[in-house]
């Protein structure tokens, strides 16, 4: 992007057009000028890449504030040139104007009761301050919606920004390791623009975008198979279950972001893989495309009958994404020394309290089972190993992935709710 400012009152034709309130008169203004923002007015037409943007007012009248902020914010993300009248002495770069960038964010407006509703969220604006040294300004391109947001909401206060990760483009940088126009995975929450500290690498701030691993694939994979859910599947299965070829693995939530990868890693490791998921279409995907040995729609089938059919010699490993009574049934089918990797409990995230379920201690003791919960951040020091391996398997065609993409930043709440309702196949993603 080329971005520089000059006094528009030196451009007589432009000033004439603006002052006549005839901003779209391209004949007067010139063919390169495709977008004009007049203070106090709306954008008259959207700029396209390579266009010239004028942020201007009447001759001699200086402009600034919101008009500039909006113009620059939009312009920099569309690679357009920006001209402006900054009588106040704005320096010739977009950076100085970020103090005026208005960001949009979804807040947790009302505590969820059961399944979240769109009206539980509110879209609000906030002014972003100027960057300090070491910081970056990002614009979200792809947003992740994940079950943990529902589970974590019990710890949030009404008014908090909704939590979440995004793949974002850096549009301004005061950090040498994060150049403008490069991508980053940032835990900025449900917002469009955000400021992050480039020195704080980690789950609560930013992670480098795995550019080499993703290559020409969609950057959104950094939120899915080549990102947190991919590493959850990779470490949660391999490190906790330590699977041996020929044994039997059951996966619940099997057609989701994590579960669909767990089953495929299981197949790579030579396991007999049995998946449970919530629709016939998902069952068909697991069996026909992902090579699962068995797949069942848990809404229609008896778990006991399904396991009698698919695991006549018992279950050695259970990767649990759902918890609750379903998982109690699976645990009853475990073989001696079996391992249970407890990843999630989505079957009751929308409930006020966990379900009353049979006690598992008897099974754990007499079958000498190992049941272990985990958070994927445990493997932060091996993060790139998981990313690299998942990317390699995808490139080799050994792992397939799917994304359910919702268009539009404003539709994040809808995408989130639909994911909780099971409408996603593979990773649920929002394209801003
Ligand atoms: N421990 C960690 O570090 C970690 C990291 C990432 C994710 N997780 C957990 O892993 C699980 C899967 O996460 P994900 O990102 O891959 O989500 P996902 O599976 O892509 O999406 C959620 C899925 O949950 C299923 N679901 C909804 N209500 C259910 C219910 N009552 N019973 C059974 N299934 C239900 C739906 O699929 P169906 O159509 O099959 O019902 C839905 O598509 C979640 O429990 C999540 O919290 C844990």
Image: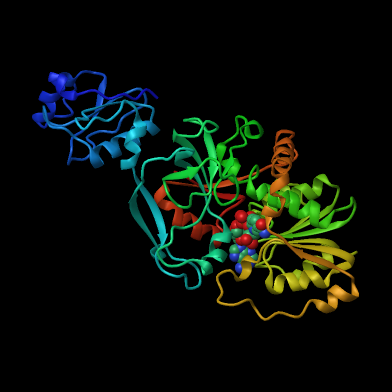
Single out the residue that lies furthest toward the front: 133
Could one spot residue 12 in this view of the protein? yes
Q: How many marks?
A: 0
Return the x and y of residue 13 as percentages of the image width and height: 13, 19
Q: Is residue 253 rendered to the left or right of residue 268?
A: left
* Relative height, residue 113 to residue 159 (above, below): below
The coloring applied to the image is rainbow
Q: Is residue 250 rendered to the left or right of residue 159?
A: right
Q: Quadrant of residue 390?
A: top right
User: Residue shown at 80%/53% (left/top)?
Assistant: 239
Return the x and y of residue 429 as percentages of the image width and height: 53, 48
* Relative height, residue 157 to residue 3 (above, below): below
User: Residue shown at 37%/33% (left/top)?
Assistant: 95
Return the x and y of residue 235 as percentages of the image width and height: 75, 51
* Relative height, residue 50 to residue 44 (above, below): above
Q: Is residue 294 rendered to the left or right of residue 402?
A: right
Front position in the image: 214 or 261: 214
Return the x and y of residue 52 as percentages of the image width and height: 29, 23
Locate ligand 1 by image quadrant. Answer: bottom right
Q: Which image quadrant: the N terminus?
A: top left
Q: Which image quadrant: the C terminus?
A: top left
User: Residue shown at 90%/52% (left/top)?
Assistant: 246
Could one spot residue 293 in this view of the protein? no
Q: Is residue 119 rendered to the left or right of residue 66?
A: right
Q: Quadrant of residue 215?
A: top right
């Amino acid at each position: 992007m080329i971005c520089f400012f000059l006094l528009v009152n030196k451009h007589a034709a432009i000033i004439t057009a603006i002052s006549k309130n005839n901003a779209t008169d391209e004949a007067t203004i010139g063919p390169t000028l495709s977008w004009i923002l007049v203070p106090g007015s709306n954008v008259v037409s959207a700029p396209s890449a390579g266009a010239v943007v004028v942020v201007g007012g009447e001759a001699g009248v200086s402009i600034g504030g919101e008009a500039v902020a909006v113009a620059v914010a939009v312009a920099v993300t569309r690679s357009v040139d920006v001209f402006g009248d900054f009588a106040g002495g704005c320096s010739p770069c977009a950076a100085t104007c970020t103090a005026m960038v208005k960001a949009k964010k979804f807040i947790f407006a009302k505590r969820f009761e059961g399944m979240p509703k769109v009206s539980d969220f509110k879209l609000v604006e906030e002014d972003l301050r100027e960057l300090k040294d070491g910081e970056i300004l990002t614009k979200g391109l792809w947003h992740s919606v994940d079950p943990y947001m529902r589970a974590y909401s019990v710890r949030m206060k009404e008014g908090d920004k909704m939590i979440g990760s995004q793949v974002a483009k850096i549009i301004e940088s005061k950090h040498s390791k994060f150049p403008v126009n490069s991508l980053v995975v940032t835990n900025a929450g449900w917002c469009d623009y955000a400021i992050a500290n480039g020195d704080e690498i980690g789950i609560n701030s930013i992670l480098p975008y795995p550019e080499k691993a993703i290559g020409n694939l969609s950057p959104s994979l950094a939120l899915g198979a080549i990102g947190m859910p991919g590493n959850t599947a990779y470490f949660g299965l391999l490190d906790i279950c330590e699977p041996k070829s020929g044994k039997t693995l059951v996966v619940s939530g099997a057609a989701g972001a994590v579960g669909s990868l767990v089953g495929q890693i299981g197949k790579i490791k030579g396991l007999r893989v049995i998946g449970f998921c919530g629709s016939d279409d998902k069952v068909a995907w697991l069996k026909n495309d992902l090579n699962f040995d068995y797949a069942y729609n848990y809404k229609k089938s008896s778990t006991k009958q399904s396991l009698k059919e698919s695991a006549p010699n018992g279950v050695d490993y259970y990767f649990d994404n759902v918890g609750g009574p379903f998982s109690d049934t699976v645990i009853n089918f475990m073989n001696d020394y079996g391992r249970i990797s407890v990843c999630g409990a989505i079957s009751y995230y929308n409930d006020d309290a966990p379900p009353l379920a049979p006690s598992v201690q008897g099974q754990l003791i007499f079958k000498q089972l190992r049941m272990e919960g985990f958070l994927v951040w445990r493997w932060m020091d091996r993060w790139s190993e998981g990313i690299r391996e998942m990317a390699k398997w995808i490139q080799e065609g050994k792992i397939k992935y799917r994304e359910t993409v919702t268009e539009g930043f404003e539709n994040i709440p809808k995408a989130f709710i639909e994911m909780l309702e099971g409408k996603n196949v593979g990773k649920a993603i929002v394209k801003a």
